[in-house]
Amino acid sequence: CDLSDEGPSTVALTAPGVNGGEYDNYYALVPLPPPDAGQANGDPHLMLAHGGKADFRGTDKGIYNFLSAKNLSLNMMTEFADFYLHDTDHPRHKLVHGSFLTQAHIVAKTGGGRTVRASYWASKIGPLNIGWMNATIDRQQAFALGPHTTKVVDDVTLHMDYSSLHVTTGEWVLAVTPQAVERSVAGPVRRIDVQMTPRVAESKFSVPPHGMIGQSWDGDNKAVFGEEDEFPVRGEYTTSAMAEGAIEGVPTDYLMSSPYATDFKYSRFGLDHASPRDVSKLTGRVKAASPQAANGAGVVEKEMELSAGQVS
């Protein structure tokens, strides 16, 4: 993936990567994000600000904007995948034609006027779950960060834990974490989850954010629920939900022209003024905000069943 004309090219760095995972990645107990965080995990399930939810299939190798703020942009790639939910002898065993997030591409403008571009690829992570990322500062030579390393560029910090990438700016913290695809049949065998957490109150954002998840910080203290996939108990299923109802416009409005592109219909990157979205124009179910546990100690069951008594 050579992006040297606009950002990091792939830097040669030998590193094993993602382990088999402690949990079943698709029907599992997953720690909830902090109460003010947004998240995309699994096949992708969006956990939105104020407690909203939606699922998002995306397109094969499509790149979508998930967060657009004044000085920060996060684009994510979706890739189609076939996998089994549960083992063959499980009563809810089924074949799913779904998708996963496989790449994260970040553009951050520092307080000193420099542009940081950083990338994390699930495909570069091996069986030991050792993470690494690569980045550029303006037009300088690309560099890589491996486990337990940090790079500070003015007021932007790039930090690698053993596996996860953390990007901290004045208003946001992003976390990108690799996972294994359990019971893979076709498609990627590694995926990533992403979490975004504001560092300031919604009323203090320099510009109200946007993007698939970012727009949910709209200052109205309401949870919006978009389309979610409902799986049959057994058999075969193709996901189709595209977060309809929880987003302004249509999903194609968030498709990006390249990994580090920042311009799209609802872009906030580089703007000095913008209005938050108007939730009254959304078609999804709306209710009062339902914040998650403050320490993230809740769980969410990620597979929805159609049979009576098994719908989450």
Image (cartoon, helix red, strand yellow):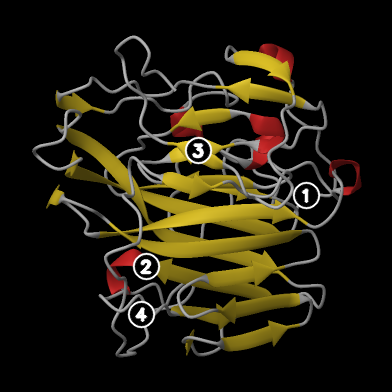
Residue identifier under label 1: 271
Badge 3 amino acid: Val
Mark identifier at residue 10: 4
Q: Nearer the viewer, residue 304 or 63?
A: 304
Badge 4 element: loop
What distance separates the C-alpha of mark 3 from that of mark 4? 35 Å
Q: Residue at x 59, y 40 (%)?
A: 213
Q: Going from the N terminus, do you reach mark 3 or mark 4 first?
A: 4
Depth check, mark 4 against mark 1: the one in front is: 4
CB contact under 8 Å: marks 2 and 4: yes
CB contact under 8 Å: marks 2 and 1: no
Badge 1 amino acid: Leu
Residue identifier under label 3: 300
Badge 3 element: strand
Q: Going from the N terminus, do you reach mark 3 or mark 2 first?
A: 2
Q: Going from the N terminus, do you reach mark 4 or mark 1 first?
A: 4
What distance separates the C-alpha of mark 2 from that of mark 4? 10 Å
Q: Nearer the viewer, residue 289 or 109?
A: 289
